[in-house]
Each structure stands twice: as C-alpha cells, then as structure tokens.
Image: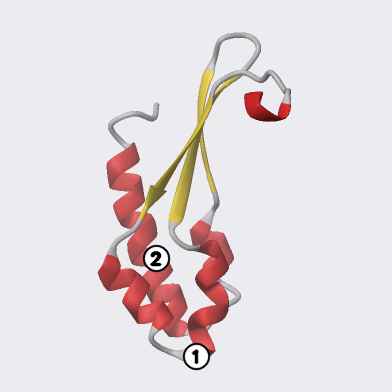
C-alpha cells in the first residue's frame, strides 16, 4: 500500500496450502471453480486500538454450497487450519 501512496496499519496475509487437498480440487474440471478460493488464506491485522486480529473465510459454511467432494476437502482443510491457528487464537 505504501508504494501506492497509502498508509495503513500492519496487515499480513498467510497462504496455507496442502498439495494433497489442492490436487483433489484442481484435478477435476467440475471442481476447478473453487480454485479462486485456494489456497486457504489467513489474515493477521492490527486495529487502530492496537488489537491484533486473526481473520479467515468460514470455509465450513462456504463448503455447504458444493458437492460432497469439495465439502470433504474443505472440511479437512478447515480442521487442519483450526489446528494450526489454535496455538495463536484465544
């Protein structure tokens, strides 16, 4: 943002990807529409009051609109992300 002339509080976006999950989605034409949501992203940002926030898409909720294969992959990825984030979230 600084390169564009904007000053903002710190924001970091972390991409979590597991090739086994990505393969299950990307190997089938009917599932590739989900690729715009890959890899799973987690944002960590600071608010004006100094609070640090961990933000992410609710993949469990989003997965409900897809068929079983995508739901299963997204559910497993969600569980793994939850495990990773459990160390930093309250």
Residue with the most extreme bottom position? 29
Q: Is residue 64 left or right of residue 15?
A: right
54 up-or-down from 35: above or below: above
Which quadrant of the view contains residue 62? bottom right
Q: Position of residue 37 (x, y in %)?
A: 54, 63
Say which element carries label 1.
helix
Residue toward you, 78 or 44? 44
Q: Which image quarter holds the N terminus?
A: top right
In the drawing, what numbered circle is on residue 29?
1
Residue toward you, 63 or 6? 6
Q: Earlier in the sequence, mark 1 or mark 2?
A: 1
Look at discs 1 and 2 and give the one toward the viewer. Answer: 1
Q: CA distance from mark 1 to mark 2?
A: 20 Å
Q: For mark 2, what is the residue?
A: 75
Q: Which image quarter holds the C terminus?
A: top left
Q: Position of residue 61 (x, y in %)?
A: 56, 61
């Amino acid at each position: 943002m600084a390169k564009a002339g904007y000053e903002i509080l710190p924001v970091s976006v972390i991409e979590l990807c597991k090739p086994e999950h990505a393969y299950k989605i990307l190997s089938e034409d009917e599932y590739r529409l989900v690729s715009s949501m890959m890899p799973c992203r987690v944002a960590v940002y600071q608010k004006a009051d100094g609070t640090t926030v961990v933000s992410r898409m609710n993949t469990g909720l989003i997965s409900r609109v897809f068929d079983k294969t995508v739901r299963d992959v997204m559910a497993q990825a969600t569980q793994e992300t939850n495990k990773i984030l459990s160390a930093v979230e309250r």
